[in-house]
Amino acid sequence: MARGPRADAGSAAGTATRRSPRPGTVARTARVLVAYLVALLTVAPLLWLLLSAFRPEGELFELGLPDELTLANFAYVLTEVPFLRYLANSAIVSVTVTAIALLLHSMAAYALARIAFRGRGIAFAAVVATLLISLPVILVPLFLVVRALGMVDSYAGLIVPGVFNAFGIFLLRQFYLGVPRELEEAAHLDGCGHWRIYWHVVLPLSRPMLAALAVLFFLANWNSFLWPLTVAQDESLRVVQVGIASLQGQYASKQHYVLAAAVLAALPTVLVFLFGQRRLVESLKTSGMR
């Protein structure tokens, strides 16, 4: 069948319409490109740090790619410097603080969210008010208290002050406020008290939130610097951040060793975040902040 001029014109117009990009598609593509650019700018210093840690000493400050990569920087840091001891100290402090804090914070948050007692609102307000106080403000009185308790230059001095974190209590309390009360009422009918309800009902439900807080607590304690520097003068108790600071002064002219130590210190934090990022995002989205 022969096609008329109108049909040909309509077909051409339809083809042009199908080929022309939609405004929404262009805007979406632009947003994606901007997002990739921002991500590249964010990751670029980390990639440069990783590359510089493998550079020989003579090529450390060159802008181009190195002619060869070497593991000598990492070998020196791990053998000639007690860096493994620093890593072990940070791991002990971070894991211990995280485990104790999750248990105590969940208990405190459950009491503030579910148990009615006189002064509960004042207690919660006092806990939240501590978020306004930074560590440098209370550094001297905190050190005096720790010294009076005989915990200077000990693991107890590194661990005990780091257990309390008002943000964890606040976040868990907000999560517990969203737990259906029917579950507690059913447990009460079965003869459960507050402790059994907390241990067998509330705590299993809060595993996603506890996993997210575990990531936050571990990262915060692994990267802590000011308090470990203040309370521990013994070199055998140095954590990894204090150890890197000492390397910067000791090896001021050999920055390739400092960069290798920085990469080794960052590896545990990257691994913990990669394993816990999904839990972290989900918990923050469903925490019932209100």
Image (cartoon, helix red, strand yellow):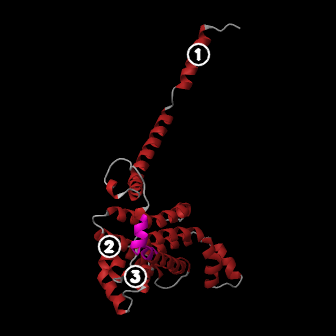
Which residue appears at 38% of the width and 78% of the height? 238
Q: Residues within 10 Å of mark 3 (few under 14, many from 20)?
A: few
Residue annotated with mark 2? 246
Residue annotated with mark 1? 10
Q: Nearer the viewer, mark 1 or mark 3?
A: 3
Q: Secondary structure at mark 3?
A: helix
- Residue bounds of the magenta highlight: 74-87
Main secondary structure type of the part rendered in magenta: helix
Q: Secondary structure at mark 2?
A: helix
Task: Give the image quarter of residue 70.
Answer: bottom left
- State the separation of the CA atoms marked 1 and 3: 82 Å
> How far from the left and from the top, in percent, is residue 15?
57, 21
**At label 2, which amino acid type do we have?**
Ser
Q: Earlier in the sequence, mark 1 or mark 3?
A: 1
Which residue appears at 35% of the width and 47% of the height? 64
> How far from the left and from the top, in percent, is residue 7?
62, 12
Identify the disc placed on residue 236. 3
Q: Is residue 167 left or right of residue 210?
A: left
Q: Earlier in the sequence, mark 3 or mark 2?
A: 3
Q: Residues within 10 Å of mark 2 (few under 14, many from 20)?
A: some
150, 119: nearer the viewer: 150
Q: Residues within 10 Å of mark 1 (few under 14, many from 20)?
A: few
Which residue appears at 40% of the width and 69% of the height? 77
Residue 290 in sight: no
239, 149: nearer the viewer: 239
